[in-house]
Every structure is written in C-alpha cells, then in structure tokens.
Image: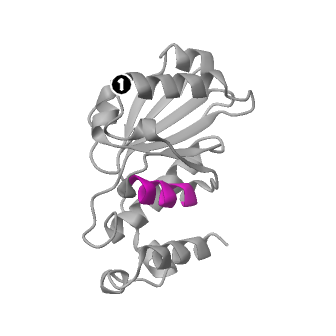
Amino acid sequence: MEKNKFYLTIGRHERYGTDTPIEREDMLVAYLSGVMLKSCLPPCDTVYHSPLARAVSTARFEALGLHCSHLLEIAELEESATAFETRKFLNNLLQNTDENVFYYHFVTHLPVIEKMGLPFLGAGEICLLTAENKTEMLKENFTLQVLKRPEIPLELWQKADLTISALDLLSEDEIYKRLADLEK
C-alpha cells in the first residue's frame, strides 16, 4: 500500500459459535484476516469493536494477526446504534487522529455496515477504504474494496499442532494462546 494514504478497514464479525462467541475455525480465520491486513497496510493504531461477544472475539483474533494490542469497545458500533451515532463517532475519530496514524480497523455487524452505506458483507468479510489522507476520508472520498475471508492453510494447522477434532476441544483462550505462540 502507498505510504501516507489513510486506511480504514470495517469488518463483519465471524459466524456464531454454539458454545463460543464465534466458531472455533473462525477464530483461525479472523487471525489470518489480521495477518493479511498487516501484510499490506501500515501498522494498525487501534482495533475498535462492538461490545457484543461475537464482535469482541473476532476483533481479538484479528488484532492478534495485525499485531495491534490496542482494542477499544465502542457502543456506536453495536447494532442498535443509529447511523448518526456511528457517523458522529467516526467523524470525531478522524478529526482527532494524530498525523502519524494512517490506519484503523473496526469490527461490527451487518446492520451497522448497511447504515454506513457500505456493501453487504458476509460473516468475516472486510471493507477496505483507501483515501489520499484523513481529510479525504472524512469527505468520504475513498476507494472501496471488499476483502473475502482467507482460507486456513494446512501449514497453520501444522504449526499450531491442531486438527479439526482437537480444535473442538479447546477454549477460545487456548486457541488464542496457540496462535500467539506462533507469533513469538
């Protein structure tokens, strides 16, 4: 990506889990989404997410892949937030962004994404918004690209010493630890 441009990525949470906020395999997918974003964007300053558990979990794993330790829960990204509340939050954030910050990531829900005027996203998909600078982003003068969910490569299963049946026995924290250990 070009240096000094300004980027926002706005993603939809992963699929609902039965005994975890998101499916266990989707924890791996969310991590890989973060890795993918990290490989082509400037360092992520903050991952903002809705307070709902499925968004919290998705944001946690995406942040791990992004190497972004600054996560913030924001009520304006919840499904019940009005379009005005969400836009006001985004505008305030952009207006107060430090000149050395070039990228933020958001995890939210389809109704919020629709209120923002962005295209339909499937679970785990991400919109990449690219502007010449934050002023142009504020003016909504950006290009938009939809990023599909990555596939889990066999190499990740091997590196994390996981199988599908073993994955089903792990808690969210245990999966997170395995992925975090890969980052060391």
From the viewer's perspective, tell me whether residue 85 is left or right of residue 44.
left
179 drawn magenta = no
Q: Amino acid at mark 1?
A: Ala
Main structural element of the magenta stretch: helix, strand or loop?
helix
Image spot of residue 96 (x, y percent)? 67, 25
From the viewer's perspective, tell me whether residue 184 is left or right of residue 157.
right
Disc 1 secondary structure class:
helix
For residue 135, what is the image quadrant? Answer: top right
Which quarter of the rendering shows the N terminus? top right
From the viewer's perspective, tell me whether residue 184 is left or right of residue 83.
right
Please, is residue 95 above or below residue 174 in the view?
Answer: above
Residue displayed at 48% across by 38% down:
9
Task: Name the foreground residue: 141 vs 96.
Answer: 96
Which residue corresponds to mark 1?
Answer: 83
Which quarter of the rendering shows the C terminus? bottom right
Q: Magenta residues?
A: 55-64
Image spot of residue 56 (x, y percent)? 44, 56
Please, is residue 181 above or below residue 27 in the view?
Answer: below
